[in-house]
Amino acid sequence: MSATPPHGNPATSWLAFIVSLPQEQTSGRMTVLRTLESLGCAVLREGVYLLPDTSHSRAGLQRLADYSSRIEGTAQVLAVTGVDETQTRNLQNLFDRTTQYEGLIKDIEALSAGFGVADPVALTRVLGKQRRELDRIRLLDFFRSPLATSAEQSLADMERKIRNLLFPHQETTPVMGDEGPYFQRTWATRRPLFADRLACAWLIRRFIDPEADLVWLDKNEACSTGVLSYGYEGANFHNTESNVTFEELLFFFNLVSQPALARIGTLVHALDAGDREMAEAPGVETMLEGARRRANNDDELLAESEKTFDLLYEAYFELPPKL
């Protein structure tokens, strides 16, 4: 979403950041430059940068000024006002994101070359990265480029095409059950997110409901009406005597015939049972523990854990023989 400056009209109110750093501060200089880039600053000349005046920009530049002082540099954040119309247009052009949007649209459309060749799940992961790139561009698109809508539409069209590759019959014969179609639903499990619950969340997002909204319930918290639950006693999908929840989902949604997913199911079962006989189990457990240490919240934990399950799927996936 584009930022709307609260300190005045974005066409007439700006922030200038003026910084000077010691030559020997190579690492600090790189940190400052990367931060300026992440904020979306335009370069006026060496050591002088510009942003539309927003509370977010002010806070970011002030933190950067404080950091510059700590590494024995100098930095000032100055408000710039009274810019005439011609100057305003010239300054706004410094923040033109057209090239970035055009490049992203081209990258999105290029995914169609992989149809019938690449694994649709791999295409989904690439498209996820492109979604994050679109969010990044839009965050820094201070003056709302019309190409933002085109990029969003291109992404939505590609998501639909890839979803049809993953679920070719979903639009005409959606998976049905007591709760209705299992598509574009809210899915809930309880904290803490151990291996089985994390694996289930990954499976839901990748193979069952790509547009699922995942929520995390506290212990003993009731699930809202209409929400699909998994991974705990009394949930729609839960452990049985012979299977963990991940395996139950595989059977219910007819995914058990996919060897890579079935093998991940065996691994998740081993992790849930504390069985370390499966060769991969200790390593995957270590990777998930690393994800827990890195993550600041459950959403981040899932994002980090998904990388592990994606890699497992890639490792287990058997490519069709070449003709």
Image: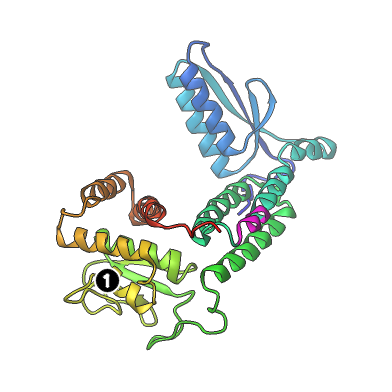
The three-letter code of the residue at mark 1 reads Thr
Kindly identify the residue that appears in the image at 60 percent across and 54 percent down.
1
Crowd class of label 1 (few under 14; some 14 to 19; many from 20; radius 10 Å): many
Instruction: Please identify the dominant SS of the magenta region.
Output: helix
**With respect to residue 34, does 228 lie above or below?**
below
Residue that lies at the very extreme toward the right in this rendered image: 86
231 lies left or right of 43: left
Q: Left or right of 81: which side holds 116?
A: left
**Above or below 93: residue 115:** below
Give the total of numbered labels: 1
Position of the C terminus by quadrant: bottom right
Q: Residue at x 78, y 38 (%)?
A: 88
Whether residue 130 appears in magenta in the rendering, the answer is no
> Where is residue 305 drawn, in percent x and y?
35, 53
The image shows residue 2 at horizontal and vertical percentages of 63, 51
Residue 150 vs residue 41, the one in the foreground: 150
What is the magenta range? 109-115
In the image, 27 versus 159, the foreground residue is 159
**SS of the residue under disc 1:** helix
Between 257 and 105, the one nearer to me in the picture = 257
Residue 111 belongs to the span the image colors magenta:
yes
- Residue 193 makes an appearance in the image: no
Report the side of 187 relative to 29 (left or right). left
Residue at mark 1: 245
